Amino acid sequence: MNMNYGKVSEAYKNAERQAVAEISDPHAIILTMFDELLRTMLVFSQNADLKAGGVVELKSKNFARAITIIYALQSSLDFEKGGDIANNLFRIYEYCRQQLLADMKMGNGESTEKALEVLSEIRDAWEQIKPE
């Protein structure tokens, strides 16, 4: 099963890379990634608790997608040019990843909801610094 998962995961990552590469505005790419990350984390948190009516397929799919987007955001950081800002963003993304992992393990969405608040603020700030 792991080998099959690896192939599917790699195909998914390649498709995401290609879709992102087709957008020419780097600012718009990041904004789109934030929007999708917030959406997937929200759906995950709403479905994390299977005993409270969460849907396992929605939980799993959105967990995986959120983790992939966080990885992409972390990978896009330029630590040389970004300095402290890039380092702080990396830490925030890592915090969000850890909250997702904790909620996946615990079967609830509480930690993810806290991470969503932080990411929403960053997303809004990113939208406001849109280049002319």
Image (cartoon, helix red, strand yellow):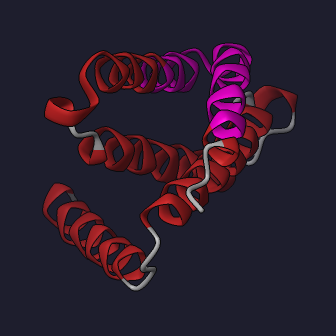
**Magenta: main secondary structure:** helix
Left or right: 113, with 27 as reference point? right
Residue farthest front in this picture = 132
User: Which portion, as a residue range, is magenta?
Assistant: 96-125
Residue visible at 32% across and 27% down? 86
The picture places residue 69, in percent across and down from the top left corner, at 44, 50
Instruction: Pick whichever, 78 or 50, lies toward us.
Output: 78
Q: Is residue 111 magenta?
A: yes
The picture places residue 67, in percent across and down from the top left corner, at 42, 42
Instruction: Pick whichever, 84 or 102, lies toward us.
Output: 84
The picture places residue 59, in percent across and down from the top left corner, at 64, 45
Left or right: 100, with 110 as reference point? left
* Residue 122 picture quarter: top right
The picture places residue 109, in percent across and down from the top left corner, at 71, 23
Residue visible at 42% across and 64% down? 26
Residue visible at 51% across and 45% down? 66
Residue farthest bottom in this picture = 22
* Residue 16 picture quarter: bottom left
When the figure is inspected, residue 11 is found, relative to residue 120, above or below; the finding is below
Q: State which quarter of the image contains the C terminus.
A: bottom right
When the figure is inspected, residue 74 is found, relative to residue 115, above or below; the finding is below
Q: Is residue 117 magenta?
A: yes
Q: How many marks?
A: 0
Residue visible at 31% across and 38% down? 74
